[in-house]
Amino acid sequence: MTEHREAWPPDDIELVLDHDEIDSDFEEIYDSKGNRITDKYVDDAIADVHRAIDEGRVPVPTSRGGRPSLTRDGTHSPRVSFRVPEELRERAKARAEQEGKTVSALAREAFEQFLKAG
């Protein structure tokens, strides 16, 4: 198998998740270039992907996704969650849309006002 030096995956390879196991000792499966896919072929392909990542040929996200911290930069904002009846959730959603904010922002504001009042 030839090492791939360009963007991964190559245009001529379609990566598909298949939950069926393949017994390469009994089944003959070929790639789009006619190479038989064996356990060694798969091992080489995995090693190639690891090399591509190490060499920077494959973009790998280096930072966590998600929303910015509400506490301060570089820190995780704690989470408070609770269940509500469907009707209350729908009312909160409608109010948040009316005010141009998320349900989370609306809930944070309401929670803060409640704690200030008490």
Image (cartoon, helix red, strand yellow):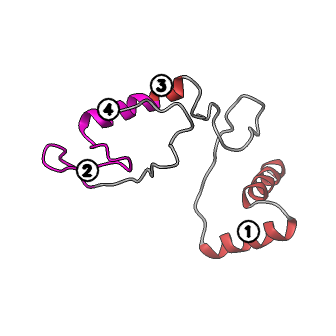
Q: Is residue 54 above or below residue 103?
A: above
Q: Please, what is the three-letter code of the amino acid marked with disc 2?
A: Ile
Residue 6 at x, y percent in the picture: 56, 34
Residue 48 at x, y percent in the picture: 43, 29
Horizontally, is 82 left or right of 28 in the view?
right
Q: Please, what is the three-letter code of the amino acid marked with disc 1?
A: Ala
The mark that comes first in sequence, 4 or 1, is: 4
The mark that comes first in sequence, 4 or 2, is: 2
CB under 8 Å between discs 3 and 1: no
Q: Is residue 45 above or below residue 107?
A: above
Q: Please, what is the three-letter code of the amino acid marked with disc 3?
A: Arg
Question: Where does the magenta region start and end?
Answer: 20-49
**Per the image, is 47 magenta?**
yes
Residue hosting label 1:
92
The mark that comes first in sequence, 3 or 1, is: 3
- State the CA–CA distance, disc 2 to disc 1: 54 Å
Which secondary structure is most common in the magenta stretch?
loop
* Residue drawn at point x = 78 percent, y = 59 percent: 106
Residue hosting label 3:
51
Residue 107 at x, y percent in the picture: 74, 57
Horizontally, is 87 left or right of 18 in the view?
right
Mark 2 lies on a secondary structure that is loop
* Residue drawn at point x = 38 percent, y = 50 percent: 32
